[in-house]
Amino acid sequence: MKRSFSGAEKGKGAAYAWEGNGQVGQGRMEITDAAASRVALDLDFIKPFEAHNKVVFTLVPQGEATEVTWAMHGPVPYPAKIVHVFVNMDRSSESNSRPASRI
């Protein structure tokens, strides 16, 4: 897999791009906002399907740990709307997530 970094070294403007095989595809993400309690990204998938999304990670201190939540927003093409009637995407992603760990 080919990977590249561009823009700022860290924080707002830092970008990461990847280009891989059919399983990984091609895309790019760039930090658009970074603060102690929040990190926002533009996430662009190019292959195997094109999608442009906004991602936000929210960080909340919990004693010696940090609770991290994330949200992704973007347009949903009509065929995907039909799939969402039959497949709960939130439930699908929960089954693939790992238990929370301390940061």
Image: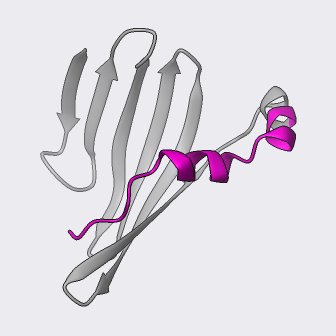
Image quadrant in which the N terminus is located = top left
Drawn side of residue 71 relative to residue 17, left or right:
right
Image quadrant in which the C terminus is located = bottom left
Q: Quadrant of residue 22?
A: top left
Residue sitting farthest toward the left:
9
Q: Position of residue 42 (x, y in %)?
A: 45, 44
- Report the colour scheme: one colour
Drawn side of residue 93 relative to residue 67, left or right:
right
At a point 26% along the width and 75% down the height, the residue shown is 36
Drawn side of residue 1 relative to residue 53, left or right:
left
57 relative to 42, above or below: below
89 relative to 36, above or below: above
Drawn side of residue 40 relative to residue 36, left or right:
right
Q: Quadrant of residue 63?
A: bottom left
At a point 55% along the width and 43% down the height, the residue shown is 53
Q: Quadrant of residue 78?
A: top right
Q: Where is residue 6 in the image (x, y as percent from the top left)?
A: 20, 33
At a point 54% along the width and 15% down the height, the residue shown is 48
At a point 12% along the width and 45% down the height, the residue shown is 9
100 relative to 18, above or below: below
Which residue occupies the foreground of this view, 61 or 46? 61
Residue 89 among magenta residues: yes
Q: Give the range drawn in magenta.
A: 82-103
Q: Position of residue 10 (x, y in %)?
A: 16, 51
Residue sitting farthest toward the bottom:
63
Residue 99 among magenta residues: yes
16 relative to 14, above or below: above
> For the image shown, how many numbered marks are present on the structure?
0
